[in-house]
Amino acid sequence: MSWFWAVLIIFWTGGFAWAADNVRTALRNRHERKLELMEAAKQERLAVEAAHQPPEPICGCTHHLAKHDKRGRCHERVEVATAWDEDKKPVRFEAGQCNCQQYIGPQPLSQVFAEQLTDRAELGDGGGADEHGGGVGDPGQEDRR
């Protein structure tokens, strides 16, 4: 039973403070690592979700392609600075038109795919005539096989 009193005296004098401090530090480090792992998993999930989305047609002026006309001119309303302070920082704003001139984002599919290479209307008699003037299924021609 004398060992019990020895352990109790060491405990009262702070001899086990190093053990408590080590346990506290280990738990804090474990908690921080868990938070870092959770944040890394969240960033990975967000990156995978972003990779599966089609590219957004956004202009350099940060407006969507729908705000631009066929010539590339933007029709979105923006805040335009009208007054500045002595440090050349804008103080007052008014509504104005976006001054970007051309959409520079990803091309929509309708502009990426090529049109038909041949035009059937230009072939003349329907495109099935041979050199003798008879078509493939002309009446009056015998099928010679």
Image: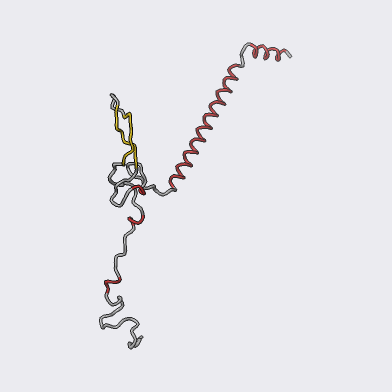
Give the residue at x 58% y 17%.
18
Q: Quadrant of residue 97?
A: top left
Give the residue at x 29% y 43%.
100
Residue 67 percent across, percent down from the top left: 35, 47
Give the residue at x 33% y 33%.
93
Give the residue at x 31% y 45%.
74
Looking at the image, the residue that sits furthest to the front is: 94
Q: Report the quarter where the C terminus lies.
A: bottom left
Q: Report the quarter where the N terminus lies.
A: top right
Residue 43 percent across, percent down from the top left: 47, 38
User: Is residue 84 placed above or below 98 in the rendered structure?
Assistant: above
User: Is residue 141 placed above or below 26 in the rendered structure?
Assistant: below
User: 119 or 137, which is in the foreground?
Assistant: 119
Q: How many marks?
A: 0
User: 93 or 3, which is in the foreground?
Assistant: 93
Looking at the image, the residue that sits furthest to the right is: 1
Residue 81 percent across, percent down from the top left: 31, 33
User: Is residue 31 placed above or below 113 in the rendered structure?
Assistant: above
Looking at the image, the residue that sits furthest to the left is: 131
Tell me the colour scheme of the image. secondary structure
Residue 132 percent across, percent down from the top left: 26, 83
Answer left or right for 14 relative to 117. right
User: 110 or 145, which is in the foreground?
Assistant: 110
User: 106 or 19, which is in the foreground?
Assistant: 106
